[in-house]
Amino acid sequence: MKRLLITATAISLLGLPLLANASPKQDLKELRAYFFKKFPGVKLQDFGNGIYALDPVRRDEWQNIEEFPPYEDGVAKGKALFKKYGLAKCFKNGGKGIKQNYPYFDSKSGKVRTLIGDIQACIVKNGHKPLGMKKGNMVAIEGYMAYTSRGKVQNVVVPNDKRALKIYNDGKTFFYAKRGQLNFSCANCHIDSPGQMVRGNLLGPALGQTSHFPVWRRKWAKKTLAKKGEVGALGGFGTLHRRYGGCNKQVRAKPLNSGKAWKTKQHPGYIALEYFHTYMSNGIKLNGPAVRQ
């Protein structure tokens, strides 16, 4: 627990990208160097497997589960919903094999666009009611689109545009800022402490984290089972922003996307975090949806 309470100042001594004037390329280069040094036997692409790149026992268990993955029915449902909502006409290449380029900065609007945000916009444009943004049918659609993008290398671009750089740096600040009653940051767990245990769970590295979303988590499946008495195709499925909210709860901070106002749209704070977080996994192949603890 002592190591989890390391301060941001102490983390900066490790050479991690905390300087406000560091470029995104510098941030990525330094983050990779840090993790290559911390886990010398782990190759870049293996970081896309999260904790399963660090623990051989958990890796074997995960590979066995992947033979009959619990997210399979959810992906099939997502494919049907993708067709039902007419999403193909809203995306390049008919919406297949494109997730690796999200999120991206839209110079016309001056905002960062996420895949889920664009799915929602297309659904509404086609005359349907908006979907919830963290689980259910939305995550099934994202799961299907992620599945068609497996093997594609993440390629998030942060252009030399003041507006894009501000959003990127807002996400970076959020990642390193402490919050909640426990006074933790994202970096405390996922940069300083990956490979260590917290409440029976192994902490994963920040490098490669976004490559496997959306994810099917046993914890979410159990929660659905306890609440509804059944799991179903989408019981354990959740988006990256759902995970962000869960992390905030775990450090006893209020999630940004809590409340009715954010049921059908994404909070700009989490969009910024996703922009930074995903850029930090550039060069790693997508392998979502995936099973996680």
Image (spheres, helix red, strand yellow):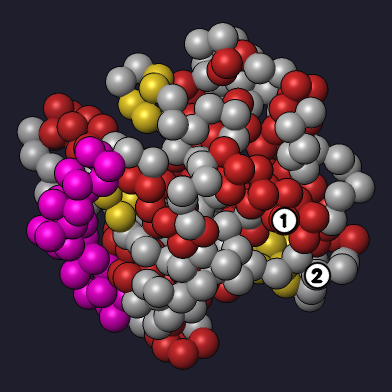
- Can the viewer see residue 206? no
Does residue 188 belong to the magenta stretch? no
| Occupied quadrant, residue 217 | top left
Q: Residue at x 48, y 23 (%)?
A: 249
Tag 2: amino acid: Pro
Q: Is residue 176 above or below residue 41?
A: above
The residue singled out by tag 1 in the image is 29
Task: Give the distance between the C-alpha atoms of the residues marked 1 and 2, in whole angstroms.
Answer: 17 Å
Q: Position of residue 154 (x, y in %)?
A: 54, 68
Q: Residue at x 30, y 55 (%)?
A: 290
- In the image: residue 183, left or right of residue 93: right
- In the image: residue 4, left or right of residue 127: right
- Comparing 245 with 192, the one in front is 192
- In the image: residue 244, left or right of residue 139: right
Q: Is residue 265 above or below residue 57?
A: below
Q: Is residue 76 above or below residue 140?
A: below
- Stretch of the chain drawn in magenta: 56-84
Q: Position of residue 78 (x, y in %)?
A: 27, 68
Mark 2 closeness class: few <14, some 14–19, many ≥20 residues within 10 Å: few
Q: Is residue 127 above or below residue 5?
A: below
- Comparing 167 with 12, the one in front is 12
Does residue 68 belong to the magenta stretch? yes
Secondary structure at badge 1 equals helix
Secondary structure at badge 2 equals loop
Q: Position of residue 13 (x, y in %)?
A: 79, 28
| Occupied quadrant, residue 282 | bottom right
- In the image: residue 172, left or right of residue 286: right
Determine the main secondary structure of the stretch shown in magenta: helix
Q: Residue at x 32, y 70 (%)?
A: 147
Position of the C terminus, as image quadrant, is top left
The residue singled out by tag 2 in the image is 159
